[in-house]
Image (spheres, coloured by chain):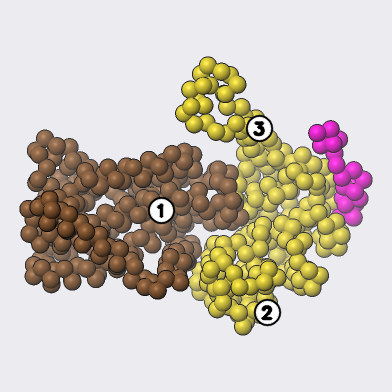
Chain colours: A brown, B yellow
Amino acid sequence: MVRDLLRYRALVRNLVLKELTLKYRDSVLGIAWSLGHPALLLLVYTVAFRHVLRVPVPHYPLFLLVTLLPWNFFAAAATASTGAIVHNGALLRKAAFPREALPVASVLFVFAQLLLALAVFLPALTLATGTGLRWTAILLVPILLLHLVFTTGIALLLAALTTAWRDVAHFTEVALVLVFWLTPIVYPADMVPAPLRAVLALSPPAAFATAYQDVLFWGRLPGWPTAASALVSTVAAAALGRAVFRSMSPAFAERVSS
Amino acid sequence: MIALELAGVSKRFVIRHNPTQDLKVRVLALFHPRHRERRHDVWALRDVDLRLRRGESLGIVGPNGSGKSTLLRVMAGILPPSAGEVVVAGTIAPMIELGVGFHPELTGRENVYLSTSVFGLGTRQTDRIYDRIVAFAELAAFMDAPVSSFSSGMAMRLGFAVATHLEADVLLVDEVLAVGDQAFREKCLARMSELRARGCSIVVVSHDLELVRGFCDRACLLREGAVAAEGMPSEVVARYAEAPVPEAARAV
């Protein structure tokens, strides 16, 4: 699978560029929208959770930023992947390229937006809040890579399953909302009552959220349960996504309409 | 040297007559057989053996629904065969439609790079053939304009230029010449002859019997998914012209 994608890397690259070009062509602000969107979310969530619900976290906008941006990446990738195969029937029925190029390109497109948003907002908010980043921030690189692999595994799984059951797209939409509120993004994990906290610790999105918070906001190393959960879920998601996608992909051209 | 070989290739499609199988229908099906999913198999290809030598052109004729397009898709690796084997020596360029992967809002240039990469070319490989594609399509002045602003003739020329400059070992052509005017058609045929002379093998699916007779080295008649005749184009076309519609199809 990886070898096929490397051979077709020009295709993956062109698919990402196509989405980028099409998304912002003819809009006045263009690519600035990929910054404007998270900026508005940060603003509204800060008002709602810091100033109305009074979540007791200092420098709340920064706290929110380091988990909200990665969550948005995951959610947008999962949503896009459910359509990556079923909405590309015309292409799938006319050429025999490696099918994984489609969901992988969808994931990389939103990942590029995450990197851009992090590159702008992270320095801006650390300066504005006067917190600064500690040395643990370099762990952002391996965490981002793990998160990318985890998300790609989930995307492959969802893209393949949607060809057999279109329900998967609807289910994903609902599940993302549920998981968002059950993940320590707008609130810190230690606000969660103890019995529930043990259950939530098993959730992969919670592990990633905690890892981002640890290295970027609290300036500490992630604990071993967080690290283990993120690692195990990444390996599991990648293996499962790859296996399901490979077994279903030969039939994609028959299952989708053009 | 064999460029493409099909050995005992069959393709089955499952036709579902009442494909809406939501929860309500499934519950009803427990009580009423009428709601149960009815499906039956259609064999679009039956035990097809074909060999294509390097630099050879093969015409495939047959009535609608005889499996011609399915055959091309199986050759191209787009559909997996249900039985049998497809062996391709080298690369294959399917021209099932002109301009595969083209998006109307992207420019001519962007579409060329996208379309070639769909067929497995890298950016540098496309750089090498880009000028030749543009020259063949006669669109040098328009490559930075979106394809939506092209006339249909311009878009067809660009699509054909891309597919025939991929330097593939096997080119599959599905009825695409039928859509252009006389000048386009002659230009395409000249280009296909040129490719064939250089060792490219070509499979042409067409209802245009003149084209098959005039261009192809060999022809094959498909009926209900099976090879009904194979040999000299003039003989195969004559067989087809005798009874273009098989008895079974006429009864339906």
Q: Could you tell me how far apart the alpha carbons at marks 1 and 2 are, in whole angstroms?
A: 37 Å
In the picture, measured across the screen, residue B196 lies left or right of residue A196, that is right
Relative image position of residue A240 (x, y in whole percent) = 37, 43
Q: Nearer the viewer, residue B104 or B70?
A: B104
Q: On screen, B237 above or below B223?
A: below
In this figure, which residue is indicated by the disc labeled 2?
A: B138
Q: For the residue labelled by badge 2, is the local secondary structure a helix, a strand or a loop?
A: loop
**Hey, what amino acid is under mark 2?**
Glu
Relative image position of residue B234 (x, y in whole percent) = 90, 55
Q: On screen, B124 above or below A7?
A: below
Give the chain of mark 3: B
Give the chain of mark 2: B
Task: Answer with the quarter of the image where residue B66 lies.
Answer: top right
Relative image position of residue B164 (x, y in whole percent) = 67, 68
Q: Is there a contact, CB below 8 Å, between mark 2 and mark 3?
A: no
Residue A258: in magenta span: no
Q: Could you tell me how far apart the alpha carbons at marks 2 and 3 are, in whole angstroms?
A: 47 Å
Query: Which residue is rendered at x = 52% and y = 53% of the image?
Result: A88
**Hey, what amino acid is under mark 1?**
Ala
Q: Which range is magenta?
A: B232-252
Query: Which residue is rendered at x = 62% and y = 82% of the image?
Result: B140
N-term-proximal mark, 2 vs 3: 3
Q: Nearer the viewer, residue B133 or A46?
A: A46
- Looking at this rendering, what residue extends furthest in the front direction? A52
Q: Is residue B227 in view from this perspective?
A: no
Q: Is there a contact, CB below 8 Å, between mark 3 and mark 1?
A: no
